[in-house]
Amino acid sequence: MKTLALAFAASSALTAPAMAEVLDLEKDMLTFGFIKLTDMAPLAVAYEQGFFDDEGLFVTLEAQANWKVLLDGVISGTLDGAHMLAGQPLAATIGYGTEAHIITPFSMDLNGNGITVSNEVWEMMKPALPTDSDGKVSHPISASYLKPVIETFNANGKPFNMGMVFPVSTHNYELRYWLAAGGINPGYYSPEDVTGQIGAEAFLSVTPPPQMPATLEAGTISGYSVGEPWNQQAVFKGIGVPVITDYEIWKNNPEKVFGITAEFAEQYPNTTLAVTKALIRAAMWLDENDNANREAAVEILARPEYVGADAEVIANSMTGTFEYEKGDTRAVPDFNVFFRYNATQPYYSDAVWYLTQMRRWGQIAEAKPDSWFDEVAKSVYKPEIYLEAARMLVDEGLANEADFDWTSDGYKPATPAEDIIDGIAYDGRTPNAYLDSLPIGLKAEQVVVGNEIQG
C-alpha cells in the first residue's frame, strides 16, 4: 500500500502538501458495511490508501450478507454507516419498509450496472437483433426484442422470471425502466401486495448480487439486473449474455450512496465531515489521470475481504471496457464513474428520480405534489455537508476548486431525451409531469386496488 500511496502523490497534479487537517473528531473508531460489488470501491480505497487514517479515523470495513441486513445494521448502530442502494435512505425516511431517517452526504458513483439474460433467452432474442457493419449486434438493445420471448414462455405455460437485488434498488428501477421502454409491464406494488408483480408480464424477484450467476445457471431466473462484477461473471462462466448496461439506459445515471443516520450526523458532525473528505479523496484517486489507478483498484477489490471475484472479471468493466457476448468486448470508459461529472455530489434531482420510480410502480401508493418530492429529497440528500468537506479539501490543497459544483441549487439540468433509452427527458423539478409522460406506470391520482389500476 505504501507503493500505491507514493504513486498517488507522484501522479497528483496538486502541488500543495498532501496532508489533511484533522478535525476535532467526536468519534474516531468506526465500522462501515458494504455489499460485495465493485462500486464499494471508494470505501476500500479510502481504507487502503490511508485517506481515513489521514483524517484521524480508525475504520473497520465489514461485508454484509444482503441489503436488508446492511440497512438494519446502520439503523441499530451496529454499523456507523454503509455503502447503500440510493433508494434505501429515501425509502426508510418515508417509511417504506423499515422506517428510519437516513441521510447521505456522498454519492458513491455513476453507472456500473447491467442486465443479463440466460443463454436460452439470448438465443431466442438474437436472430431478430439488428447488427452493425462488422456483423456484431447493435447496442443498445431494446426490451421490445424480449417481448416475443416472454410470449413464447407463456405459450409453454412458463412464467418469465428475472432477478433484481432489492425492491428499492437502482437495479429494480433500471430493469423496470428498460422493460417498460420496450412495452413490457414489470408489475405494480400495492400496500397489500409488496411482491411488485401485480399485472406483470415479467416477474421480478429479489436475489442477492453474488448469487445471481448461480441462480441463473440453475434456471430459477431467466435474466437479472445487477452491478459488477456479476454480469461479467456470467460471461466468464458461459451461462449468460449481458444485453444492456445502465449507461445505455440512462447516460451517467446515479448509483449507490454512502448512508448514515440523521442522528449520527447530528451527534458527530466533524466525524461526518472527516468521513466525507476521505471518500471524496478516494473517488478522486479512482478517476484521476483517465482512470490510471484502476488496475491498482482491481487488485484491491479482488481481495476476499472486499469483492472477492477474480481480478480478470473485475477488470473487464472496472478498466473501461465491457464484454457482452464472449469475445465481444467494447470500450465503455464511463461504465464506472466515481468522481468526474460531479459523481460524488448528492443532488436532489437524483433523489427525486428514485422517488418518481417508487411512485410509478406503486411503492408510493398515492399521488404526491411536486413540493413533497422536493422536501423528501432535501431531508435525505445533504449537499451542504458534501460541499463543506470539499471546501476543506480545497483549502488544504488536496482538491481542485474547479472540480466541484459550488453554485448549484441541488438540481441538475434536465437530462435530455437522447440520453435515456425511451427518449423521454427527465427534469427533477417537475416530477409529476415526468410521471405523466411515461407510457407505462401510475399517473396523477391513479392507485392500485387489488389487481387493478384505478383513477
Image (spheres, grey):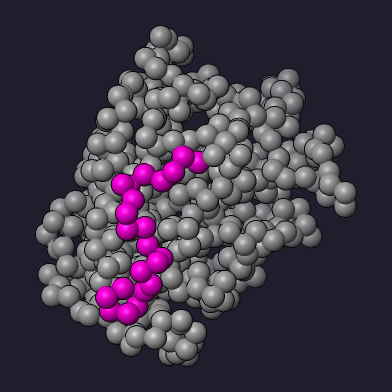
Q: Kindly report the secondary structure that dominates the magenta region of the rendered protein.
A: loop
Q: Which residue is rendered at x = 69% and y = 61% of the image? A: 331
- Residue 284 makes an appearance in the image: yes
Q: Decide: is 2 above or below 364.
A: below
Rendering quarter of residue 143:
top right
Q: Would residue 134 be found to the left or right of residue 404 on screen?
A: right
Viewer-side residue, 88 vs 270: 270
Indicate whether residue 410 is drawn in magenta. yes
Label count reads 0
Which part of the image, by quadrant, shows the C terminus?
A: top left
Q: Would residue 67 be found to the left or right of residue 216 on screen?
A: left
Q: Decide: is 436 above or below 295.
A: above
Residue 52: horizontal and vertical position, in percent?
30, 76
Residue farthest to the top, as pictured: 455
Indicate whether residue 419 is drawn in magenta. no
Segment colored magenta: 394-415
Which part of the image, by quadrant, shows the N terminus?
A: bottom left
Residue 41: horizontal and vertical position, in percent?
45, 66
- Residue 258 makes an appearance in the image: no
Viewer-side residue, 53 vs 138: 138
Q: Which residue is rendered at x = 13% and y = 56% of the image? A: 266
Rendering quarter of residue 163:
top right
Residue 159: horizontal and vertical position, in percent?
63, 27
Q: Which residue is rendered at x = 45% and y = 13% of the image? A: 453
Q: Which residue is rendered at x = 17% and y = 67% of the image? A: 270
